[in-house]
Image (cartoon, rainbow, N blue to C red):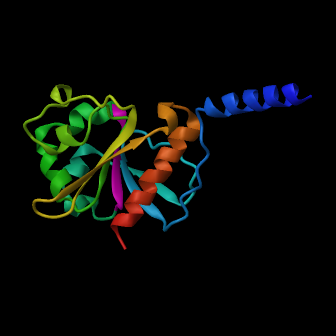
Amino acid sequence: MKKAFLFLLMIWMIAGCSNDTVITPLYEGRNLKIGVIGDAPDVREEHITFNPITFDEMAQGKQGLARFDAVFIMKEHHHEAAESPYAKVYRTAGIPFFYIESEKSHIPFVHEDIAYDDADDFNSGDFAAGYYQTGRYNGQGWSFGLYNGKKNKPNVLGAYTQIFITIESLKP
């Protein structure tokens, strides 16, 4: 009986250690309005509003983006988003930008002289990079990973929740 119990306990521990998913709490903060270039992501939170925008609208900078708490740029638009004319927008718009499923950090987006393909790859399995210019010479960057580096629906939803928490922390 004791051996059977120990065997079952060992199986349970091994199964628990190989779990590639974690269920995280929902973001329960204030309503957020997020501009998105590309298709809006599916998220668990119902009080997050995604509004499609174009690169032309984004190029207006602070004036065109003031109605948003943040901007998400989806994977299929990263090469264009890293073109030099937009670097100044990311540094002066007064809101954070998140590059969803970026294989790079925020560096090729905020530096005019670094092309997306020339920037170093994330080798950490991060899901998204973020950037917020906090002053004339000060910027803050983030990376958001997936639990155990595994891309699955619960882990992706959890990463979005962490991004929403970050956005809320930036504005009172």
Outermost residue, right side: 1
Q: Is residue 30 left or right of residue 65?
A: right
**Residue at image point 41% right, 64% down:** 168
In the rendered structure, does residue 78 fall within the stretch colored magenta?
no
Q: Is residue 32 left or right of residue 83?
A: right
Instruction: Examine the rendered structure and indicate whether residue 109 appears above or below residue 141.
Output: above
Q: Position of residue 64 (x, y in %)?
A: 24, 59
Residue 71 colored in magenta in the image = yes
Left or right for 138, reference 130: left
Residue in view at x 24 percent, y 42 percent:
106
At x 36%, y 61%, the residue is: 69
Residue 99 appears in view? no
Q: Nearer the viewer, residue 33 or 16?
A: 16
**Quadrant of the image occupied by residue 171:** bottom left
| Stretch of the chain drawn in magenta | 68-75
Q: Is residue 131 above or below residue 41?
A: below
Please tell me whether residue 132 is drawn above or below residue 130 in the rendered image: below
Quadrant of the snapshot with the N terminus: top right
Q: Is residue 35 visible?
A: yes
Front position in the image: 158 or 46: 158
